[in-house]
Image (spheres, helix red, strand yellow):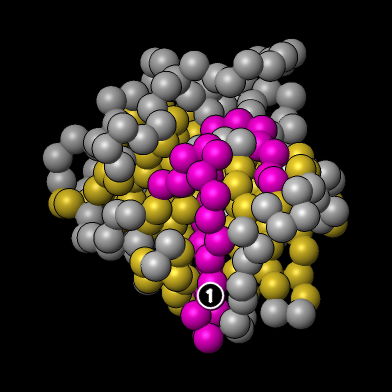
Amino acid sequence: MIAAGEPVAGGDYPVPHCAARGPQRSRRVWPEHASLWLVQSELEDGAELEWSGRHGDEGVYITAGQVREGGRVCPSGGAVIVESDVPARLRASGPARLLHFGPADPRPPAGDRPRPPEVHVVGPGGRFARRGDGRDTRLFADSTCLGCRIFLLYTARSGPFESAPHMHSQDELVHLLWGGITLGGRRLGPGDSVFIPAGQAYGFSGAPGGFGFVNYRRGLSRMTDLRSGKVQTEGGAAGGLERVGDLR
């Protein structure tokens, strides 16, 4: 687990293929030997992030403010998907806070990539969603895009919650936005992050007031329910979520 911490002011952006221009504060979260990383960033008005060179499929979740990618605007609660090796530039329109997720290995997971890489802007509603009865789940990318394999999810509960014990076939990086969860005897609060390796069995419980977190994986995952033994491919349509939008 990585505890909450303040972004570090100034200096170079902490991943080599992404340059920051203008006033910004950033902090890299990379558990030792982990395959995934996270950069927490605060950009002042007009500050930019620019991708170049070799990089993997990456996701940027906007926690406050808004950013522009070309003529497209991504507001708070939305996400930008930067596919492998594609050049990209995000510009803050006013102060903005971001969660920037990526893989340590820039090579995309195995699978067909039948079209040139792109940059997608996904609004706060996500591509797939399930809401109601205290649940708010939104998938911004579910590893089924023709040009990328990234998985990026926001999920929340408004009250107490207990997950079934389970495991995933992909490494995952979870960042708690609000509320709290208890996982493996550890309590996570807002700003905490946890890396969970593929094949690690776990379950978690939510705080009485609920929780909301963002989950990133670099490739298509299957979940095993350890009570029933059921194995399910994870994703929007596969998980029974409602389709609410498309990548653009």
Q: How many marks?
A: 1
Determine the main secondary structure of the stretch shown in magenta. strand
Q: Position of residue 177 (x, y in %)?
A: 45, 66
Q: Position of residue 118 (x, y in %)?
A: 62, 26
Up-down: is 121 above or below 174?
above
Judging depth in this view, the residue of 49 and 129 nearest the camera is: 129
Which residue sits at x=28%, y=25%? 16
Q: Amino acid at mark 1?
A: Gly
Judging depth in this view, the residue of 101 and 186 nearest the camera is: 186
Crowding at mark 1 (Cα within 10 Å: few <14, some 14-19, many 20+): many
Secondary structure of the residue carrying tag 1 is strand
Residue 110 lies within the magenta run? no
Q: Position of residue 172 (x, y in %)?
A: 50, 43
Residue placed under numbered mark 1 in the picture: 206
Which residue sits at x=41%, y=36%? 36
Q: Can residue 193 be seen in the rendering of this structure?
A: yes
Magenta-tinted stretch? 195-224
Place residue 104 in its image quadrant: top left
Place residue 247 in its image quadrant: top right
Up-down: is 58 above or below 183?
above
Residue 202 lies within the magenta run? yes
Which residue sits at x=60%, y=47%? 167
- Left or right, residue 47 beside residue 214: left
Q: Can residue 188 be seen in the rendering of this structure?
A: no
Which residue sits at x=68%, y=53%? 226
Up-down: is 75 above or below 196?
below
